[in-house]
Image (cartoon, grey):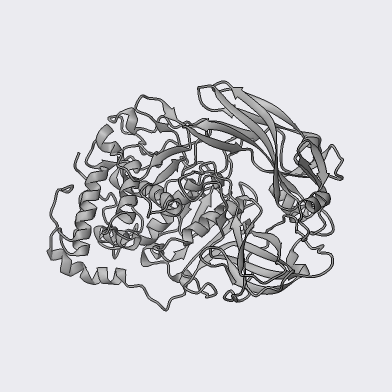
């Protein structure tokens, strides 16, 4: 067995009332207040150690300043090879705009030597979409082979519009200017009046002529990106009917995977707040289509991101989807059991009150006959959509603890610890801070790494069900603590994590850590894996966002695909210490414990076991002001499970014990 001591069974009677209270959840509380006693006791200034991704093998960044509007004839992009070996790749210019179409133009195949850069000029006259009526999104993408799989990397988004379709110069700007200066992307006088040209083969065609040739006769509203918050009017249940409108988040993640839900395909906007509006006749000159339409329904999309209603045939509607995702047994019910408001922040040094819920809009026209159907409607791609997709995946989990899971996108961790860069992501209280692209860095912003977002949400979940496993001893990832034990081999250090891009070396997947620290960070990785993998399948893939040290001393740059189901036993095989653990092993342990087998243990039960080990909720003040042992050992966790379930031979206790042994988190080598 992977434990050393036998618990004192006399404690069972003493703790039984406490455990009963932990398991009981009041039903009359408003959902936003139903955060659990563990979280209510947490001080808001207690932070989980912050983190951010390392550079992928290639990075792409505009060397032309993208921000305030500027009339330009070309843009320059720099490709940096962050590895020591030559990289071959293809480049393409990618435009999104007009009638929500994406068009690309190939730039060719290239190579760049190890640790070198290459710069390319992009003439605006050659963009695949030259939009006059609306802003179009512009990126440059590099595709290379990474660990045997294609990897697509991109510049940050720039936005462009032209004075005329034949112009060779365009006005270029960033997202903040798009919303503040250019009416959220509507440049012309009518949102339905599309004007511009599209590259088809080697020629440009007028968008109206192209749509007629393609048989697209229904009007289409060009893309707009609204920052107008979430309305406060009452929500209704979807009325039901023959037509199903199913908006989907379009994402752009560096760590996409063919083996999980984020495989490059759009993700249903499950539980998102939405409105369906009937378009008014005539010109829609307002930046917000709500001003030229009639409200048909306002509520929450269902668990797959759809709303059915009895639409009129051959009629144009809008669907307006907010980055405000909430779940309750009935989608229209307020208060919510769980809610995630995603707010986009305008700048690195912005205040939280400057961050706003976003709204993405898509028009659609119903068919001429009322045949029951569902229509997928891809929303405009955006950073807010990336985080919205994570929020929808989050609330789709069947064992998610009730509460709030708010996200501030492009807002770095407000922790004052000097070891924590201001652009790192972290979790505190109800809020996850998703760090921006660091100044003078070409590493993609954290919102483009699904597992960074998921990892920080995992910390929020763990605090709701457990409390705070604060680790005040060394190897604790804060000022004055030693990140790596000098006695451990390099295979259990973080020295291989690059610091050139402001990536901290405080902890990593392979580092030997105090058990409680490995528990906390491993849980974050596990939860990110849980968001994007199907537990009913026989595998689990996790794309790690930092460098991974291989046994031969080389390192693999992110994203590094790790198996989150088959035991690695990294600590046991590289640096065994019964009082330590690695994030890698604890990630796999929690995955198996929570998702695999007949005796798997729910998140709530995992929380209650930890609470038992703490003698109550794991908070800084302990129980009734008495501090507890924050550095929770495996023995204490195992014995707490036996106490919680009523005996060493209870099936869940046996499963926890065997799983701990199998994955190298117990005290056995």
| Front residue of 152 and 506 | 152
Kindly identify the residue that appears in the image at 52 percent across and 34 percent down.
56
* Residue 132 visible, this orientation: no
x%, y% of residue 142?
61, 33
- Is 404 positioned to the left or the right of 194 in the image? left
| Front residue of 391 and 396 | 396
x%, y% of residue 594?
33, 56
* Residue 336 visible, this orientation: yes
Q: Which quadrant of the view contains residue 44?
A: bottom left
Q: Which quadrant of the view contains residue 649?
A: bottom left
In the rendered image, the vertical position of residue 316 relative to residue 239, given as above or below: above
x%, y% of residue 249?
59, 55
In the rendered image, the vertical position of residue 100 relative to residue 141, given as above or below: below
Kindly identify the residue that appears in the image at 78 percent across and 60 percent down.
219
- Is 633 positioned to the left or the right of 152 in the image? left
How many numbered callouts?
0
In the rendered image, the vertical position of residue 12 relative to residue 629, given as above or below: below
x%, y% of residue 197?
81, 45
| Front residue of 408 and 557 | 557
| Front residue of 434 and 287 | 287
Q: Which quadrant of the view contains residue 119?
A: top right
Which quadrant does the C terminus fall into?
A: top left
- Is 429 positioned to the left or the right of 163 in the image? left
């Amino acid at each position: 067995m992977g434990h050393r001591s036998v618990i004192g069974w006399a404690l069972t009677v003493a703790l039984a009332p406490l455990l009963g209270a932990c398991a009981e959840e009041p039903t009359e509380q408003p959902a936003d207040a139903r955060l659990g006693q563990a979280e209510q006791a947490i001080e808001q200034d207690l932070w989980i150690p912050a983190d951010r991704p390392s550079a992928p093998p290639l990075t792409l960044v505009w060397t032309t300043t993208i921000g305030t509007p500027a009339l330009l004839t070309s843009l320059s992009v720099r490709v940096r090879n962050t590895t020591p070996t030559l990289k071959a790749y293809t480049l393409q210019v990618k435009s999104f705009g007009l009638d929500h179409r994406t068009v690309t133009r190939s730039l060719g195949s290239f190579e760049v030597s190890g640790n070198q850069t290459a710069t390319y000029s992009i003439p605006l006259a050659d963009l695949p979409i030259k939009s006059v009526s609306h802003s179009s999104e512009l990126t440059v993408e590099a595709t290379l082979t990474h660990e045997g799989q294609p990897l697509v990397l991109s510049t940050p988004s720039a936005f462009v519009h032209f004075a005329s379709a034949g112009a060779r110069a365009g006005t270029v700007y960033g997202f903040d200017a798009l919303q503040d200066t250019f009416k959220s992307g509507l440049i012309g006088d009518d949102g339905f009046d599309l004007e511009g040209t599209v590259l088809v083969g080697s020629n440009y065609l007028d968008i109206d002529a192209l749509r007629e040739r393609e048989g697209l006769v229904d009007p289409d509203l060009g893309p707009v990106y609204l920052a107008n918050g979430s309305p406060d009017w009452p929500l209704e249940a979807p009325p039901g009917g023959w037509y199903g409108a199913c908006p989907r988040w379009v994402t752009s993640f560096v760590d996409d995977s063919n083996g999980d839900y984020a495989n490059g395909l759009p993700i249903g906007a499950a539980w998102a707040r939405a409105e369906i509006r009937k378009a008014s006749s005539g010109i829609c000159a307002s930046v917000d289509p709500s001003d030229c339409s009639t409200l048909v329904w306002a509520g929450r999309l269902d668990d797959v991101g759809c709303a059915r209603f009895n639409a009129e045939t051959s009629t144009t509607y809008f669907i307006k989807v907010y980055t405000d995702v909430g779940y309750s047994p009935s989608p229209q019910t307020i208060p919510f059991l769980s809610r995630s408001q995603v707010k986009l922040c305008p700048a690195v040094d912005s205040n939280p009150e400057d961050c706003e819920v976003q709204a993405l809009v898509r028009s659609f026209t119903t068919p001429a006959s009322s045949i029951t159907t569902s229509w997928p409607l891809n929303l405009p791609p955006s950073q807010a959509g990336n985080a919205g997709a994570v929020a929808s995946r989050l609330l789709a989990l069947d064992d998610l603890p009730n509460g709030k899971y708010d996200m501030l996108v492009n807002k770095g961790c407000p922790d004052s610890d000097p070891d924590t860069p201001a652009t790192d992501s972290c979790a505190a209280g109800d809020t996850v801070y998703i760090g921006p692209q660091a100044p003078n860095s070409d590493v993609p912003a954290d919102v483009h790494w699904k597992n960074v977002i998921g990892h920080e949400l995992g910390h929020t979940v763990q605090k709701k069900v457990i409390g705070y496993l604060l680790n005040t001893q060394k190897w604790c990832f804060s000022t004055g603590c030693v990140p790596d034990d000098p006695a451990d081999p390099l295979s259990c250090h973080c020295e291989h994590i690059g610091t050139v891009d402001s990536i901290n070396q405080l902890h990593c997947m392979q580092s030997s850590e105090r058990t409680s620290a490995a528990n906390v960070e491993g849980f974050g990785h596990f939860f990110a894996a849980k968001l994007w993998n199907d537990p009913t399948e026989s595998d689990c893939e996790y794309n790690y966002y930092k460098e991974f040290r291989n046994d031969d001393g080389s390192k693999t740059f992110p994203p590094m695909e790790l198996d989150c189901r088959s035991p690695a036993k990294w600590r046991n095989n590289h640096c065994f210490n019964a009082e330590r653990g690695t994030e890698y092993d604890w990630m796999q342990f929690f995955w198996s414990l929570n998702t695999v087998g007949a005796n798997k243990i729910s998140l709530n039960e995992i929380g209650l076991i930890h609470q038992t080990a703490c003698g109550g909720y794991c908070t800084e003040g302990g129980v009734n002001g008495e501090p507890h042992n924050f550095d929770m050992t495996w023995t204490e966790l195992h014995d707490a499970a036996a106490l919680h379930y009523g005996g060493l031979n209870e099936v869940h206790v046996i499963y926890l014990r065997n799983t701990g042994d199998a994955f190298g988190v117990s005290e056995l080598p």
